[in-house]
Image (cartoon, rainbow, N blue to C red):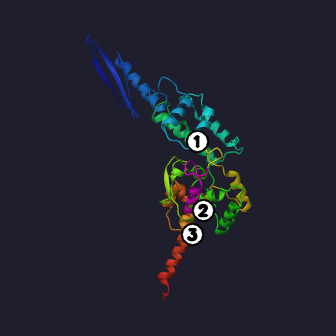
Amino acid sequence: MSSIRERPLKNGGCRYQAEIRLKGRTITATFDRKTDAKNWMQKTEADIRCGYHQPHLHEKKHTFREAAERYSKEHPISIAKKGHIEWWVKELGSLYVQDIRASAISEKKQKLLTEPNQKGCVRRKSTCNRYLATLSHLLGVCVKEWEWAPENVVRKISREKEPRERTRFLTREERQRFFGACLKSENPNLFVFVVLLLSTGCRYNEIRSLKWVDVDLVQGRITITKSKNSDMRSIPIRGMPLDLLRDRSSKHLSIGYIFPGQDKSKPLEFRRSLKTAIHRAKLKDFRPHDCRHSYATEMLAQGLSLGEIGHLLGHRSVSMTRRYAHLVESRSIDAVSKMSEQIFQGFEND
């Protein structure tokens, strides 16, 4: 929508103010001649529709490094996202945000998929998609909130097709072997650590970074303050896991980390001892993260819904918990079979 207003002058003359309202923007300009005002409106409207005219951008250009620093201060980010942003700063830090092109992002995407990470492994397609998602949100903030860029170019980049999520969980017999291997571990803290993983469904770093202030030994509850998605959640804990924590609190100073490292300022690392225990227990295709799947499976067996399980696991959407839907279907078939036997038992269709 556009309009032209006449603005009379004190000397008897007149000027023409052109106003354009398009795509949520209002742009004005003043001219001595009405013809110039019309020409300006036609050209500006065409430029806006094509994405060439960006009057909302600050005159000063901002680098991606500046954007990343401001984003980290104004938006809560998880440990994983922090790593993503640091990688993007290394690759794009010196570029001006409004000058970043989709072709540059596409080139970096290929680098993500081919270069080894700090552990010497090539990133998975799902990991690459998480890096792109973090960048997309950052640039989206630059466009919508700060007006530092004309568009979010990451939206033009196709995502990698991810394999179906694994749902590996421990059987009763495998669980016993795993516990036995943990008890024989050179790491005396491993058994308690694994028990907490399996009884809470928490992620590796959530339990590893757990502090005594996050544990309520009276009510039997732990609070996760630093999660992967930065959300806080509370998880009930009962039985042997709670008894192990109470026993541990009586033998250790109940401040700081539950599993402190040698210098007490950092939590203990369990990756090597976990890998050894998994090998000794002869658990095929099993990763520490699969303890979450085992927890979810047990919760399903106790009758919890996918939504309730997702809440305990810290999932933001039910779609993340749908990987367990086939287990629900299997349970539903058993329930329907039992129901049919009870309702139609003794009935014969003549």
* Image quadrant where residue 3 sits: top left
Look at label 2 and name its amino acid.
Ser
- Write the residue at 56% across / 39% down: 135
Look at mark 2 in the image and give the residue it sits on.
294
- Write the residue at 66% across / 67% down: 176
Q: Which residues are magenta?
A: 242-259
Q: Residues within 10 Å of mark 3 (few under 14, many from 20)?
A: few
Q: Which mark is residue 330?
A: 3
Q: Which mark is residue 97?
A: none
* Magenta run includes residue 249: yes
Of pointers 1 and 2, the one earlier in the residue sequence: 1
Q: Position of residue 93 (x, y in %)?
A: 59, 30
- The mark lying in front, picked from 2 and 3, is 2
- The mark lying in front, picked from 1 and 2, is 2
Q: From the viewer's perspective, is residue 171 above or below residue 225?
A: below
Residue 78 seen in this snapshot: yes
Of pointers 2 and 3, the one earlier in the residue sequence: 2
Determine whether the residue tagged by mark 2 lies in a helix, strand or loop.
helix
* Image quadrant where residue 198 sits: bottom right
In the depicted view, which residue is nearer to us: 265 or 221? 265
Determine whether the residue tagged by mark 1 lies in a helix, strand or loop.
helix
Residue 158 seen in this snapshot: no
In the depicted view, which residue is nearer to us: 146 or 69? 69
State how far apart marks 1 and 2 are (Cα). 30 Å
Q: Residues within 10 Å of mark 1 (few under 14, many from 20)?
A: many
Of pointers 3 and 1, the one earlier in the residue sequence: 1
Q: Position of residue 240 (x, y in %)?
A: 57, 64
In the depicted view, which residue is nearer to us: 153 or 329? 329
Q: From the viewer's perspective, is residue 76 above or below residue 330?
A: above
Look at mark 1 in the image and give the residue it sits on.
132
